[in-house]
């Protein structure tokens, strides 16, 4: 078994599950992009960059 591949698969599946939950509840997920920016991704597919104020106050 390759632990690194197993971990990558688990992380991907967790993200997929979060997207399904967000769609079911009409909410969004928050994640950090490869460029280091935090974004909200809505169940509609709309993605908006978060600013520093959003990060502090949620």
Image: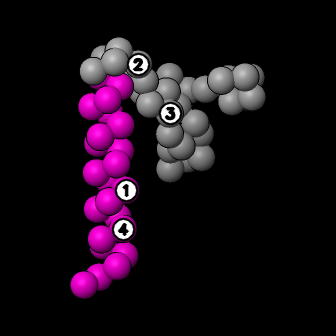
Location of residue 51 by image quarter: top right
Q: Answer with left or right where residue 33 lies relative to residue 10.
A: right
SS of the residue under disc 4: helix
Relative to residue 6, is residue 2 depicted above or below? below
Residue 20 at x, y percent in the picture:
27, 31
- Check residue 6 for magenta coloring: yes
Q: Which residue is mark 3?
A: 30
SS of the residue under disc 3: strand
Q: Which residue is mark 4?
A: 7
- Check residue 56 for magenta coloring: no
For the residues labelled 4 and 3, the Cα–Cα distance comes to 20 Å
Q: Which residue is mark 1?
A: 11
Answer with mark 2 or mark 4, whichever residue precedes in sequence.
4
Please state which of the two labelled residues, at mark 3 or mark 2, is closer to the viewer.
2
For the residues labelled 3 and 2, the Cα–Cα distance comes to 10 Å
Does the rendering let one see residue 46? no
Q: Residue at x 44, y 30 (%)?
A: 29
SS of the residue under disc 2: loop
Residue 39 at x, y percent in the picture:
52, 31
Q: Answer with left or right where residue 51 lies relative to residue 22.
A: right
For the residues labelled 2 and 1, the Cα–Cα distance comes to 20 Å
Answer with mark 1 or mark 3, whichever residue precedes in sequence.
1
What segment carries the magenta color? 1-23
Q: Given contact means CB atoms under 8 Å apart, are the residues at marks 4 and 1 in contact?
A: yes
- Predominant secondary structure in magenta? helix
Q: Given contact means CB atoms under 8 Å apart, are the residues at marks 1 and 3 in contact?
A: no
Does the rendering let one see residue 13? yes
Quarter of the image for the N terminus: give it. Answer: bottom left
């Amino acid at each position: 078994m390759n632990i690194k591949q197993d971990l990558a698969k688990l992380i991907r599946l967790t993200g997929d599950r979060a997207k399904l939950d967000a769609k079911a509840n009409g909410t969004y997920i928050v994640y950090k992009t490869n460029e280091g920016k935090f974004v909200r991704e809505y169940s509609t597919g709309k993605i908006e960059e978060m600013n520093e104020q959003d990060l502090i106050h949620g």
